[in-house]
Image (spheres, grey):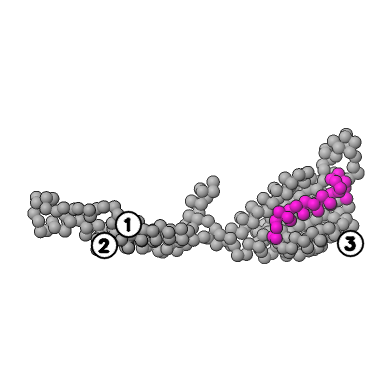
Amino acid sequence: MTELASIQNLHFLRPGWLLLLIPFALISFLQWRSGDLGRQWQGVIAPHLLPRMVVSGSQRQLVSPLWVSVFVLPLLAVALAGPSWKRGESPFAVDSAALVIAVDLSESMEGKDLQPDRLQRARSKILELSQARGDARTALLAYAGSGHTVLPLTNDANVLLHYLEALQVGMLPKRGKSPESILPMARELLAEGGGTLLLLGDGAPENSIETYRALSDEKGVQLIVWGMGKTQEEMDKDAERGLKSSALPLNEAGLMTLSDAGDGVYQRVTPDDEDVTRILQTIDSHYELSGDSSRPWMDGGYYLVWPIVLLFLLWFRKGWALRW
């Protein structure tokens, strides 16, 4: 599939240079005709004697200035035209790969259906994701009944970890669960280069869902919803094994509806790092697609320089120029 995509993307950065193929073809044709001894002497020698009087010798051998030029000149024209089939790295790659993380700090995040609790599990998952992303720019938001910016975009993972550890349930001034309250801040942070809004929580009220529909119309912004907690069915199975929990079940339907409203992706928390891997792939895929237009096309003409130079070395052969 990659090779097919490369062929479909093949184009020329400077197509005007391909016009050189016309004079190159004309010159090569005239030179070929001038090397035809029969044509040169047909006006002097009788036609019935011409085949016996003219000896072509080695005029038509492959390694000759004419035939080498037939390969070199088109290669030169194609190289100057700048063939390109893939994009290079954007000089604004760091700015384009922004990630805004919004963490639910409502009371339900104290649920211990995930050990040690939902918020602590969310912290550890964010830490894994941050370590996998390296020095990519990341911001941290928090919400309960209201939304707040905890950390603006930064590429310092240590600073992110410091603020992440400070997040606690009940630290925000307004109780409740309003994931829509972080949208104005997320839009402002992602206004320049776009990026991904990653929302971690255990539910979403119905009145929040409609607000996220407008997010699907915003170009360059991707929504990922990361569900933290266990569903009622999973909690019932735990209770049968004697693992009772007073936590409210994960409102997975609400989170999935919220994700669909924002044309986003929903991911359940997993006991291993499978969820982190999937989210990281989703972030990277969005960055490649959204940043594609800002990435410059690579000039493939440089790859043709070496064959052109190697063929041009034949011009240093003794007597080569005289054979024209």
Please name which of the two marks, 2 or 1, marks the residue nearer to the observer. 2
Query: Which is nearer the eye, 105 or 280?
Result: 280
Whether residue 234 can be seen here: yes
Please name which of the two marks, 1 or 3, marks the residue nearer to the observer. 1
Residue that carries the numbered disc 2 in the rendered image:
319
Quarter placement of the C terminus: bottom left
Q: Residue at x 9, y 51 (%)?
A: 49
- Give the residue furthest to the top: 240
Whether residue 258 can be seen here: no
Q: Which percent across, then down, holds residue 138?
A: 73, 60
Q: Which percent across, then down, holds residue 320?
A: 28, 61
Residue that carries the numbered disc 1 in the rendered image:
68
User: Looking at the picture, which amino acid does disc 1 mark?
Assistant: Val
Q: Secondary structure at mark 2?
A: loop
User: Looking at the picture, which amino acid does disc 2 mark?
Assistant: Gly
Question: Is 124 positioned to the left or the right of 311 in the image?
Answer: right
Query: Which is nearer the eye, 257 or 24?
Result: 24
Mark 3, other Cα within 10 Å: few <14 / some 14–19 / many ≥20: few
Q: Residue at x 90, y 42 (%)?
A: 245
| Mark 2 → mark 1, Cα distance in angstroms | 15 Å
Question: Is 160 positioned to the left or the right of 294 in the image?
Answer: right
User: Looking at the picture, which amino acid does disc 3 mark?
Assistant: Pro
| Mark 1 → mark 3, Cα distance in angstroms | 80 Å
Q: Residue at x 19, y 53 (%)?
A: 57
Q: Residue at x 70, y 58 (%)?
A: 134
Residue 252, numbered label: none
Marked residue nearer the N-terminal end (2 or 1): 1
Marked residue nearer the N-terminal end (1 or 3): 1
Please name which of the two marks, 3 or 2, marks the residue nearer to the observer. 2
| Range covered by the magenta-colored residues | 110-136
Residue that carries the numbered disc 3 in the rendered image:
173
Question: Is 127 positioned to the left or the right of 245 in the image?
Answer: left
